[in-house]
Image (cartoon, rainbow, N blue to C red):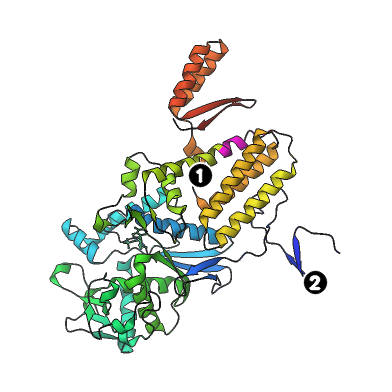
Amino acid sequence: MPPFDRNFYSIGSVRIERLNIFAQATSLGTYMSHVAPKFKLFNTLTRQKEDLQTITPGKVGMYTCGPTVYDYPHIGNFRAFVFEDLLKRWLQFRGFQVTHVMNLTDVDDKTIKGSQTQAKPLREYTNFFANAFFQDIKVLNIEPATVYPRATDHIPEMVSIIKTLLQKGIAYCGEDGSVYFAVSKFPKYGKLSHISVQELKVGARVSQDEYAKEEAQDFALWKAWTPEDGDVYWETELGKGRPGWHIECSAMSMKYLGETFDIHCGGVDNMFPHHENEIAQSEAATGKTFVNYWMHNEHLLVEGKKMAKRLGNFYTLRDLLSKGLDPLAIRYLLLSTHYRQQFNFTFEGLEAAKSAIERLTNFLRRLKDANGKGGSRKVNELTEKVEGCFGEAMDDDLNVSVALASLFDFVRDVNNLLDANELSREEGTMVSKLISNLDKVLGVIPKPQEEALPAEAQVLIEQREEARKIKDWKTADAARAQLKAMGIAIEDTAQGIRWKRIRA
Ligand code: AMP
Ligand code: ZN
């Protein structure tokens, strides 16, 4: 029998190289405990988990429905954006080059109404909320998309698709001058949302952008101008008017990703009618499959009900930040429940998220002090285990709760090694790198500079040092107690004074 080689495995006589996704993370001689991982995702189209097979090997084209820039998004909306960020980061971690397109819906019923209420031109009004959105995603450590197309910059692309649909006889002009999509002409209508097409009333029309399944009928592609639209209109070959919401996403996604692309995401509320109508328009126009994988996140709830503007049960990110809450704890909370499960937003949940992040930052700080003998087999076993478990869980349709559980098991076990002074300095550095590498996916650990010791605490530490030098234990203890009240614990180590955050 040939000698066992860690870097290869065999099927029959074939030797296959193991994929070491954590190669940059550690030089502890670790390797993937499973082979050539395949990312499985739940495809709403088939209601099944499927292996991701991209159109171009190694590349992913991904479209995510972006914000309607008529107001500040609430944190329910951010649940969708954080899930999409996690998905993108995981794909990148697995080596895919991701082209991510996120649109800004800057013309629809809501933006028009908002601009009129504030008596501002539409662009000025939506610019304000678009900028607020960009600030918010930065605070939540959401990586920027490759491109953020705005609907109002893509009217010719929308007109072109609508003209094709008119030429093919799939769209028609209503007596109100608007152009409608004839649902009865697209036999696959309902394939995503599983709506029963028999229930459709032929020729019945809906002009507003949002409606319920029960009301499904021909929908507006182009809306003829009405006095309520004020100065928001485009003079086009389709007449004076503006686009419907659904055509916006078809036009922008296909422009940047092609007529068929890999992944389209959004919240479950977007599945019908928005995504169903995107499929109908796009596939009827091109004759090709529009999207291969549809992924939908479940809702963030408040006391069992969807967090939504119209229900008034929402918090914006700014509401939470003004209460002094930590944005990375909000991010952690939003991503730590599997994206296909609903969950209730609570302040207790946010506290738990904050503690989880503190456990990670305190662990990283402790690793800096590792000074043991090292060389124990244990640390190799633990790193291999966490690499395998974390990767397997994330490859299983982003099973983040299992991935996080494996990470915290690892933290506990390595903490035990640190307690027993078994970790060498070099091993401590390697483990830190591994944690930082996994955080490229999670994005929840604050950057070191954000974790700077507050100036007030710095002064107290110096006072304590001075007091200790002259054996003034009373003053030294008082300084330590004051630091504790600020939520900071200090430790005297061989390398000097170390501090960590604790519950005050
Ligand atoms: P909108 O700005 O309304 O178009 O929504 C932006 C994204 O947020 C869409 O993908 C919605 O499906 C999603 N969304 C809206 N409300 C929630 C919620 N309560 N929980 C999770 N996602 C939501
Ligand atoms: Zn959309």
| Occupied quadrant, residue 268 | bottom left
Q: Nearer the viewer, mark 2 or mark 1?
A: 2
Residue furthest out toward the right: 1
- Magenta residues, start to end: 363-372
Whole-percent x, y for residue 286 in the image: 41, 83
The residue sitting at 43% across, 49% down in the picture is 333
Q: Residue at x 60, y 41 (%)?
A: 412
Q: Residues within 10 Å of mark 1 (few under 14, many from 20)?
A: many
As drawn, is 26 to the left or to the right of 296? right
Where is the C terminus found, in terms of image quarters?
top left
Pick the quarter of the image with the N terminus: bottom right
- Secondary structure beneath disc 2? loop
* Amino acid marked by disc 2: Ser
Find residue 53 and report its horizontal and vertical position in percent.
Answer: 56, 72
Q: Is residue 487 left or right of residue 437?
A: left
**The image quarter in which residue 496 lies:** top right
Asked whether residue 368 is drawn in magenta, I would say yes
Residue 64 among magenta residues: no
Quick one: which residue is furthest to the left in this view? 227
Q: CA distance from mark 2 to mark 1?
A: 45 Å
Q: Mark 1 = which residue?
A: 445
417 over 76 or under it: above or below: above
- Please name the amino acid that badge 1 sits on: Ile
Identify the mark at residue 13; answer none if there is no mark. Answer: 2
